[in-house]
Image: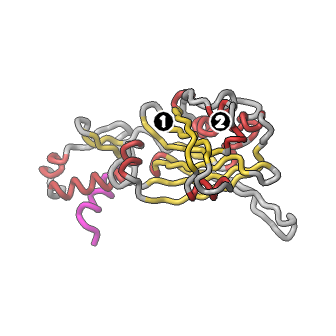
Amino acid sequence: MAPKWRDLADRLAEQIRNGRYAPGAQLPQIRELVEAGEGSKATVHQAYKALEAEGLVTSTRGHGTVVRSRAPLKRLGIHRYDKVKWRDGDEVAFIADRVASGRAYKRDEQTQTVSRVQASDLVAEGLGVPVGSEVYARARLVKEGTQPTHTLTSYYRPEHVEGTRIVDPTPGPAGRGGGYRVLYDAGYEIDHMKEALFARVPTADEAQLLQLPVGEPVVELHRTTYTADGTVVEFAVGIHSASRFAWEYEFRVPDSANDNGAEDSA
């Protein structure tokens, strides 16, 4: 038999999904549910914390527990990097996600800092440089309105980006078409990528920066970007709020017997 808090959380979740509690609506105060016989204060509190961890509600001091007003953003797979978007237009990756999700955006919802740092073990392996080498770190915090959605830090070899808009700390993408257009104009046309994803518990700093509810995990992304000759021109690490994205991938199913070993990866 499920514990009482789980049963209460499941019933409230169903009421949220069927529209009894609409997006933006406030759930009853804890004392109201206690007085209605739904359980002790601890039971109701634990049920609300479960709903928050599952991404259905947010709880803030002074505002109570409120149903989340937006569905998760689509986080596209290979289609967010379509060259037509950034080479021929101005739809950088985070904007491509917003467009696919039918959501408004402003370019300055991406802020950034740029610095030269020593390559950690992870970054050195990703870029293929010695540990401790100086590299550029372009760190972005991306928001939807006032709500942070993720961080993304791209690392570059200095010889690839020195003097370009990529190392300009002005908020927003690095000019029309963003960083990939800058690399393209510098003679480093991106050709293929490798992405690795894993979920984990956030650090205290990450939870504060992304304004995460208690118990919510993050999805960490490692992205390696190559030119056609295999040169790594970017290694990026992203930290995403797990409940604020729906990851979407579409790709050709490989047939290595007939494709000469070629395959598409997302």
Quick check: 242 above or below 172? below
Q: Name the residue: 42% across, 32% down.
A: 146
Amino acid type of disc 1?
Lys
Q: Label 1 belongs to which residue?
A: 143
Looking at the rendering, the stretch of residues picked out in magenta corresponds to: 1-17
Amino acid type of disc 2?
Val
Q: Is residue 40 left or right of residue 50?
A: left
Q: Quadrant of residue 96?
A: top right
Residue 64, percent from left and from top: 25, 40
Q: Is residue 227 left or right of residue 29?
A: right
Q: Name the residue: 58% across, 51% down.
A: 119
Residue 137, percent from left and from top: 58, 42
Q: Quadrant of residue 176?
A: top right
User: Quick one: 129 or 58, which is closer to the camera?
Assistant: 129
Q: Name the residue: 57% across, 58% down.
A: 121
Q: Is residue 139 left or right of residue 266?
A: left
Badge 2 density bin: few <14, some 14–19, many ≥20, Cα 10 Å: many
User: Which of the two discs, 2 and 1, labels the residue nearer the N terminus?
Assistant: 2
Quick check: 247 above or below 183? below
Where the C terminus falls, by quadrant?
bottom right
Residue 134, percent from left and from top: 61, 46
Label 1's element?
A: strand
Q: Label 2 belongs to which residue?
A: 92
